[in-house]
Image (cartoon, rainbow, N blue to C red):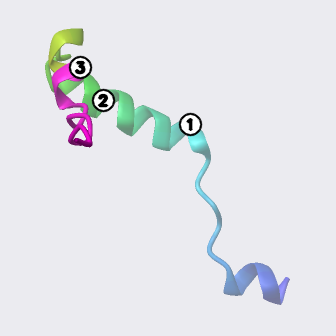
Amino acid sequence: PLVLRERPPIPPPVIASQTVIRRLAGLPVPPRSVIIERIPPAPPRPR
């Protein structure tokens, strides 16, 4: 069990998912139009 003591116990993924869900619930969900605008513009067209 020495190796287990050296490595901290990995928290269950349920806690991480709950924290993410809480953050998303706190922030207003942006409409799809905003998400599309966030996509970086296409590269400049080569002449």
Mark 2 residue crowding within 10 angstroms, few (<14) / some (14–19) / many (20+): few
Relative to residue 8, is residue 1 depicted above or below?
below
Q: Amino acid at mark 1?
A: Val
Looking at the rendered structure, the secondary structure element under dot 1 is helix
| Range covered by the magenta-colored residues | 35-47
Is 29 placed left or right of 6 in the picture? left
Residue beneath the point at 17% across and 17% down: 30
| Residue 24 quadrant | top left
Q: Quadrant of the C terminus?
A: top left
Q: Which residue is mark 1?
A: 14
Residue beneath the point at 67% across and 79% down: 7
Sequence-first disc among 1 and 2? 1
Q: Which residue is mark 3?
A: 36
Percent coordinates x, y for residue 36 in the rendering: 23, 20
Relative to residue 4, is residue 34 depicted above or below?
above
Is 1 placed left or right of 41 in the picture? right
Identify which residue, 35 or 18, lies in the foreground: 35
Q: Nearer the viewer, mark 1 or mark 3?
A: 3
Q: Which residue is mark 2?
A: 22
Query: CA separation, marks 1 and 3?
Result: 30 Å
Residue 44 in magenta stretch: yes
